[in-house]
Image (cartoon, rainbow, N blue to C red):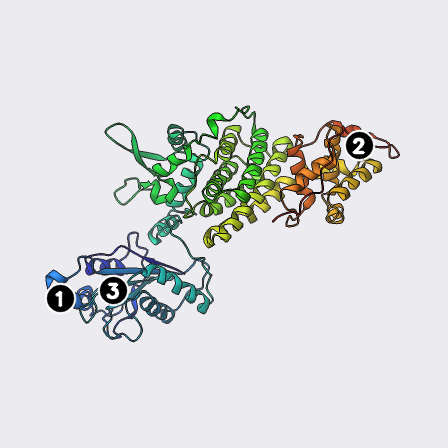
Amino acid sequence: MIPRIHKRGSETIGLIRYLYGPGTHEEHTDPHLVAAFDPLTPDPGRDPQATYGQLQRLLDQPVNALPASRRPKKHVWHLSVRASPEDPILSDDDWAAIARRMIAATGIAPVGDDAACRWAAVRHADDHIHIIATLVREDGRRPRLHNEARRAQAEARLIEADYGLRRVSPGDGTAAKRPTSAERHKADRHGRQRTPREELREAVRRSVAGAAGEEEFFDRLAAAGLLIRRRVAPSGDALGYTVALPGDRNAKGEPVFYSGSKLAPDLSLPRIRERWTKTSADPAQEPAQPSVTGPASARRRASAAAWQALLVIDHGDDGVIAAQIAAAGEVLDALAQTSAAHTRRELHAAATAFERASRSHVRAARGHDHALRQAARDLVHGGPAFGRGEDGATAAMAVDMLIFLITAAAHWHAKKQHAQQAEAANRAAEHLRAAYQAAAEYPMAMLNHRGRRLAPAWQRHHSAAVRQVLPELADRILAEPGWPALAATLADAQAAGHNPAALLGEATRRRELTSATSISDVLVWRLRRTADLPAYGVSAAEAHRAAPANSQPAPARQTPTPSTPRTPRR
């Protein structure tokens, strides 16, 4: 249940006409009172003799009783209370009880206060009510409304529990604005699954993901087919922008424009510019990396950047962590728009869900997120993946690492008591797990096939390495369906001159494994990334596969054997 206190007004009759009228797009149906300060309050919706003017005069009576000099300029108080889409339709009696609880909790009409403000609750849709009140009490005093929005939210949580409704996590004011009822009804009439506000928010997010500067950002908006207006200072510098969908028109046939700040708090032009902040330790002084050569290279770069961001979330300052989390949202947006068809739906859902987790009251220390933002840029410019071969395998590698990053973000938000953000990050992680299953199915099947064809001597050799490095998890790993793929990966690593035990130690030292659905899958992608092995396999493994069953594995190039790994951390 979502309560929202609207801006105060100066004309009671104007709000009454809106609540009882057809609505901006004729979305209001059967407007009527469900409750009021007086049971005999006239209801223009059900009583043919009642008028809007009668209801207005009754509500305004305590205001008009004051001398003109003492009347508040903004005396009209307005609260809407909306049920979640999955909640059952409540009766008028239920909504009446909810209205009384809300006006008591906010201080408009405390229980037992005979001199409280006058109010009325109007219902003109199945899923919400509007409460109108005038802010002068019967005794001429003003109501005490300190923190009424917070108290309304607290009461909504109690109402959800009492009525068995969906439990909404408490917000912190950083969420994107929800579509209005009028916007939803308009979308329904035009056969749109989402409102223009939601489509525009996604388009702007995708356009800014990894963008290197302002002109590139606006070029991407134009390439996405949006109508753009820039607010320009006399100096020629852009002060802000608005965007519209070409087909979204108002009653006059004009495009309906939204400013970036109305789409989401971090999509205003000043907040977007913060993403291009540089730090003395980051982009300018880092050695230049080779440019990406395609989708596989971009996904491998994204996997490496996610791993580094994971270490920052473990040990960084809050502002730096917030920047990594925000940039992770850009990586998800970029990955979703360049993904293969069989992973696109889940990656799109993950990016949409994580949008809420990318903002909190902890201000992001921009500039420290350069690696992730560069990874997002690489994904956009690296082109779309097709889901087979190297780009499909590196997609699985990147998604596997992003699951850990997004889960770490959820834990950080939960620790900071950012309930909505933690819930959003957990939802995103679930979508990523589904995307991983789709992305990894083919490459893991091929790696498993190669692993099962390894000679028994090589299988024993690599299982011994697992028992040496991970004695407590070895039995579980060797019993997993993905063990042959891990054996093939260890064979590829040894053929490339690496020490398999050393690689396993490095892959397990910094991040826990027990929460993974498949430890062997996680190790496959960590090893292939750490050893810089092609994600889809290497020809050197063919030599191992062809080795006779009674042959002895050749010793690998000697590298220091790792010390016993530290206790894995969650």
- Helix or strand or loop: what does disc 2 sit on? helix
Q: Position of residue 318 (x, y in %)?
A: 47, 45
Q: CA distance from mark 3 to mark 1?
A: 16 Å
At a point 30% along the width and 31% down the height, the residue shown is: 238
Q: Nearer the viewer, residue 383 or 19?
A: 383
Identify which amino acid the numbered label 3 is placed on: Ala
Query: Of the numbered discs in the image, which one, if any, rests on residue 133?
Result: 3
Q: Nearer the viewer, residue 378 or 106?
A: 106
Q: Nearer the viewer, residue 297 or 343?
A: 297
**Residue 446 appears in the figure:** no
- Which residue lies under the disc numbered 2? 545
- Which residue lies under the disc numbered 1? 66
Question: In front: mark 3 or mark 1?
Answer: 1
Residue ranking furthest to the front = 563
- Helix or strand or loop: what does disc 1 sit on? loop
Q: Position of residue 94 (x, y in %)?
A: 38, 70
Q: Quadrant of residue 406?
A: top right
Identify which amino acid the numbered label 1 is placed on: Leu
N-term mark: 3 or 2: 3
Q: CA distance from mark 1 to mark 2?
A: 94 Å
**Crowdedness near tag 1: few (<14), some (14–19) or many (≥20) residues, C-alpha within 10 Å:** some
Taking the image as shown, residue 47 lies to the left or right of residue 535, namely left
Q: Position of residue 130 (x, y in %)?
A: 31, 62
